[in-house]
Image (spheres, helix red, strand yellow):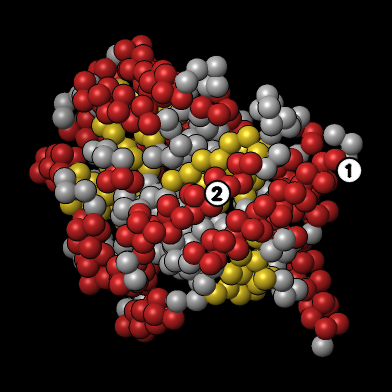
Amino acid sequence: MQQQKQHHIGALQEMDANHHLHPFTDTADLAQRGTRIIERADGVYIWDAEGNKLLDGMAGLWCVNVGYGRESIAKAAFTQLKTLPFYNNFFQCTHEPAIKLAAKIADLAPGHMNRVFFTGSGSEANDTNLRMVRRYWDLKGKPGKKTIISRKNAYHGSTVAGASLGGMGFMHQQGDLPIPGIVHIDQPYWFGEGRDMSPEDFGIKTARALEAKILELGEDKVAAFIAEPFQGAGGVIIPPASYWNEIKSILAKYDILFILDEVISGFGRTGNWFAAQTLDLKPDLITIAKGMTSGYIPMGGVIVSDRVADVLVTEGGEFAHGFTYSGHPVAAAAALENIRILEEEGLVDKVRQDTGPYLQDKLQTLAAHPLVGEVRGMGMVGAIELVANKDTLARFDNEIGAGMLCREACIAKGLVMRAVGDTMIISPPLCISRDEIDELIFKASQALSLTLEKIAAQGN
Ligand SMILES: *Cc1c(COP(=O)(O)O)cnc(C)c1O
């Protein structure tokens, strides 16, 4: 039996190596290292084909907010698949799941946002944003307002527009990005780039880069500013408290649109349905995906404010944009059931009042570890910065690969954490219990010690 299973795993791995091109992966390197086949999942745990049980500290890819194994989402999707597996929302047609989901999201979103444009992913949603803000300014008779200001080390997806809006240099290097009309300002990454000032001053300084860029380009050329509430893929970078206040006053001063990319933060991760509510921001457009369906079925979208919708709808005529799967009925049915679970179990309130603060408290206990230079987080996300010297907070040389060593140590201890350089990040399912948080922190601390041992063994 065991041998048969091993044989099966080996055959799958070989097929994978021969035929499957993985996203964001060095394929040649992967073939060397081998792959882990994930077989099943339940609650906050995943199991690989070899039977190892891992606590999923990343909720898949920031998305499985209600946890794995939800029968009711499977049933909602199955029922919808039998009734109406597909119909489009083009050509004067619509269907109940898409209608109800749009209305539900409008209900949960900030009061000035009442419409939703559906897409198949977060990247498509940001592509939609790019076209929508430019369309908005054309309709307003200001066709010169085309440039979008984003931030270095932002992540807004992987399509041509998404990767261009994003500020990842290693992505821009491939495919001649960014496309014209997108510029990037400095990020509010205090631990990485601002330690010569107080967090407060650094927050103001990096926010003022927005104003400087608007003035440099000319307000009549700027369409929008796009930002994540906290940079997720960039390393769970949480701006200093002063940052958003300064950004808000700059946005109030200039006539540009504000796109808040809530693909990670949306649907409860910061303890409110949207981080716009947590941070008291007033975006014109909100990007959503990931937690929208808890990843059970792909779906994304843009929540559109009345300000933008009024122009688009009353003056716009046809918005020549959309996807075959915009508002897909099965995805919409899964999203509705996902939201119902979040509501019924009070998971968003729980993150705000109970498990979120509990996770943040427990995370801070890791700050004492000799390998850790800073711990930060909010709601149900967190980051642990690994440093070579705890006193000077000096970072490791890149060649050491401390983050990768720690990621492997986590797996050895039964925990999935992601490494962004030498920043370890977590974003667990919102349904995680206090006991499971204790387990996560215990495993993380064991993994940190194992990492330290491995680094010492390398002679560093
Ligand atoms: C994941 C992500 C995206 C892209 O979403 P996809 O569904 O992968 O296209 C966009 N923005 C942010 C903030 C994300 O984390």
The reply, left or right, for residue 286 in relation to residue 43 is left
Q: Which residue is drawn at 71% across and 48% down?
A: 448
Say which mark, if any, is on residue 363.
2
Quadrant in the rendering for residue 191: top right
Q: Residue at x 39, y 35 (%)?
A: 227
Say which element carries label 1: helix
The reply, left or right, for residue 402 in relation to residue 188 is right
| Camera-nearest label, 1 or 2 | 2
The reply, left or right, for residue 411 in relation to residue 399 is left
Quadrant in the rendering for residue 306: top left
Q: Is residue 213 above or below residue 236?
A: above
Query: Which of marks 2 and 1 precedes in the sequence?
Result: 2
Say which element carries label 2: helix
Say which mark, if any, is on residue 317.
none
Quadrant showing the C terminus: top right
The reply, left or right, for residue 112 in relation to residue 424 is left
Query: Residue 82, position in %: x, y?
Result: 36, 84
At label 2, counting other C-alpha atoms closer than 10 Å, the crowd grade (few under 14, some 14-19, many 20 or more) is: many
Outermost residue toward the bottom in this view: 1
Query: Residue 381, position in %: x, y?
Result: 48, 49
Quadrant showing the N terminus: bottom right
At label 1, counting other C-alpha atoms closer than 10 Å, the crowd grade (few under 14, some 14-19, many 20 or more) is: few
Instruction: Determine whether the beta carbon of the residue marked 2 sits less than 8 angstroms from the nearest atom of ligand 1.
Output: no
Q: Which residue is drawn at 43% across and 54% down?
A: 356
Q: Can residue 58 be seen in this view?
A: yes
Q: In this view, does 340 lie above or below 34?
A: below
Q: Which amino acid does label 1 sit on?
A: Ala
Mark 1, residue position = 457
